[in-house]
């Protein structure tokens, strides 16, 4: 059974710092990996999707990498801002799930001014 | 929000009553999902649909049923609500191997 883990569960950094969020998964047979952002009381917003054949994706100050063989992904946020404060979740679709995403429990990020 | 509407946004109901939550999309996406989100458990899949009248169970399907009679609508029914079903419910849509888009959620309280 696929399991997704995110470490740390919470992170507090000063504004301007570059930071890395980690995601690991137990079964490397995935179709894709997605990173989401969730603000308090809101739904999830898709940030980046990495196909299983890709190594990384970039959008603005965000860069996500994928290493299937080691079962790891990282989300790099450059020059963090207070507006980046949110919970970040990663999720994978694996070979046996017919399109179902399996989520980690998220990393709660706080960027202090 | 990617053309997804959940209704109602908030609901309070009593134990033992039936409850139906609605998800409506305007994107013509094939896949639709119902998740619940609870502190300490994260997001867990209840049911999903991969086409009209094609549905399957997720990780926490006991006590829930779904129906999808049209591409755009996916209904989640609690036949007899229990306090353990107090949660925030999210609908999501996607096409195969494309990003998931979420609705804004329904906060359900069962008293």
Image (spheres, rainbow, N blue to C red):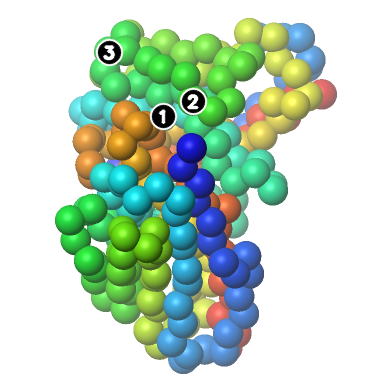
Do the dots labelled 3 and 1 sit on one chain?
yes
Q: Which residue is mark 1?
A: B33
| Marks 2 and 1, the one that precedes in the sequence | 1
In the displayed structure, A93 sits above or below B76; it is below
Circle 2 or circle 1, nearest the eye: 2
**Residue reaching furthest left?**
A53
Pinpoint the chain carrying mark 1: B
Pinpoint the chain carrying mark 2: B
* Residue pictured at 23% horizontal, 35% vertical: B95
Whole-angstrom CA distance, mark 2 to mark 1, is 9 Å
Q: Which residue is mark 2?
A: B58
| Marks 3 and 1, the one that precedes in the sequence | 1
**Residue reaching furthest right?**
B111
**A4 on left or right of B88:** left
In the displayed structure, B44 sits above or below B60; it is below
Across and down, in percent, residue B93 comes to 33, 34
**A5 on left or right of A61:** right
Whole-angstrom CA distance, mark 3 to mark 2, is 17 Å
Residue B89 visible in the shown view: yes
* Residue pictured at 35% horizontal, 21% vertical: B49
Across and down, in percent, residue A19 comes to 46, 82
Q: Is the Cβ of the residue at disc 2 closer than 8 Å to that at disc 1?
A: yes
Q: Quadrant of residue A56?
A: bottom left
Secondary element type, mark 3: loop
**A54 on left or right of A105:** left
Across and down, in percent, residue B106 comes to 57, 34
Secondary element type, mark 1: strand
Q: Is the Cβ of the residue at disc 3 closer than 8 Å to that at disc 1?
A: no
Residue A107 marker: none
Residue B101 or B106: which is nearer the viewer? B101
Q: Which residue is mark 3?
A: B52
Pinpoint the chain carrying mark 3: B
């Amino acid at each position: 059974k696929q399991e997704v883990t995110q470490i740390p569960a919470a992170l507090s950094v000063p504004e301007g710092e570059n930071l890395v969020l980690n995601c690991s998964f137990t079964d490397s047979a995935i179709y894709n990996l997605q990173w989401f952002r969730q603000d308090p009381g809101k739904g999830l917003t898709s940030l980046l999707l990495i196909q299983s054949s890709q190594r990384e994706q970039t959008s603005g100050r965000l860069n996500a990498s994928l290493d299937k063989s080691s079962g790891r992904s990282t989300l790099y946020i450059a020059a963090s801002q207070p507006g980046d404060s949110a919970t970040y979740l990663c999720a994978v679709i694996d070979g046996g799930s017919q399109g179902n995403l399996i989520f980690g429990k998220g990393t709660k990020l706080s960027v202090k001014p | 929000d990617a053309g997804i509407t959940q209704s109602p946004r908030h609901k309070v109901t009593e134990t033992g009553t039936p409850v139906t939550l609605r998800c409506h999309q305007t994107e013509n996406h094939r896949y639709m999902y119902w998740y619940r989100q609870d502190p300490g458990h994260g997001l867990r899949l209840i049911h999903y649909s991969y086409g009209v009248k094609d549905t399957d169970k997720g990780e926490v399907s006991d006590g829930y049923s779904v129906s999808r009679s049209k591409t755009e609508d996916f209904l989640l029914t609690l036949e007899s609500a229990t306090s353990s079903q107090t949660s925030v419910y999210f609908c999501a849509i996607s096409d195969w191997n494309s990003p998931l888009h979420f609705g804004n959620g329904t906060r359900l309280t069962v008293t």
